[in-house]
Image: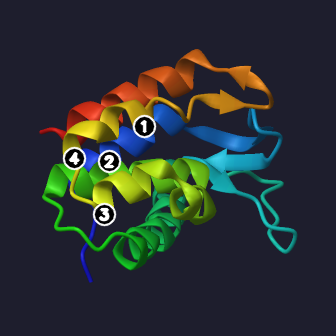
Amino acid sequence: MRHITPVGLNIIKHYEGFSPVVYRCPAGYDTIGYGHLVRADEDFSEGVTHSQAELLLRNDVRAAEQAVLRLIQAPLHDGQFDALVSFTFNLGAGALQRSTLRQVVNRREYDSAPEQFRRWVWAGGQKLAGLVRRREAEILRFHA
């Protein structure tokens, strides 16, 4: 199976940020570590270390990688794959599946991808500066 590169993983880590304790993300989900969504059967009352957060991240990223591999049929270079995995990690496989971004990439219209990435900057009904910055970083990686 194909995996995100270290550069791509660092994009996710940078934009997710690290939290050793559970917090509520802008979309309203309990989150810990590097963007790990806390499930009902998980107890993080004692928090997580950086190494524990890294393990959670790597497991969570696998699902995003699998979704990109399943939903994108067009050939991708590493930067494109990284960008799409970061996007999917952040928004979920359902967002990629129903997105025009997916359609554009699968038609190999790679130059049209940036405008599609830029549509996904909203959470909780608000345009978030952090998502704007993240999408721009993903666009840069997509065209690397």
Q: Is residue 144 toward the left or the right of residue 131 in the image?
A: left
Confirm or deny contact between disc 3 and disc 1 (CB under 8 A).
Answer: no
The residue that mark 4 highlights is 110
Give x and y (percent) for residue 48. 64, 53
Q: Nearer the viewer, mark 3 or mark 2?
A: 3
- Image quarter for residue 114? top left
The residue that mark 2 highlights is 83
Mark 3 to mark 1 CA distance (whole Å): 14 Å
Mark 1 to mark 2 CA distance (whole Å): 9 Å
Q: Which residue lies at the image location 24% right of the left edge and 76% below the top edge?
A: 2
Give x and y (percent) for residue 97. 54, 64
Confirm or deny contact between disc 1 and disc 2 (CB under 8 A).
Answer: yes
Q: Which residue lies at the image location 43% right of the left edge and 38% below the top edge?
A: 116
Q: How crowded is mark 4: few (under 14 residues within 10 Å), some or many (20 or more)?
A: some
The residue that mark 3 highlights is 106
Q: Nearer the viewer, residue 89 or 114?
A: 114
Confirm or deny contact between disc 4 and disc 1 (CB under 8 A).
Answer: no
The residue that mark 1 highlights is 117
Mark 4 to mark 2 CA distance (whole Å): 12 Å
Q: Is residue 125 above or below residue 8?
A: above
Q: Which residue lies at the image location 63% right of the left edge and 38% below the top edge?
A: 19
Give x and y (percent) for residue 31. 72, 48
Determine whether the residue tagged by mark 2 lies in a helix, strand or loop: helix
Q: Is residue 120 toward the left or the right of residue 23 in the image?
A: left
Of the numbered discs 3 and 1, the one sitting upstream in the chain is 3
- Image quarter for residue 1? bottom left
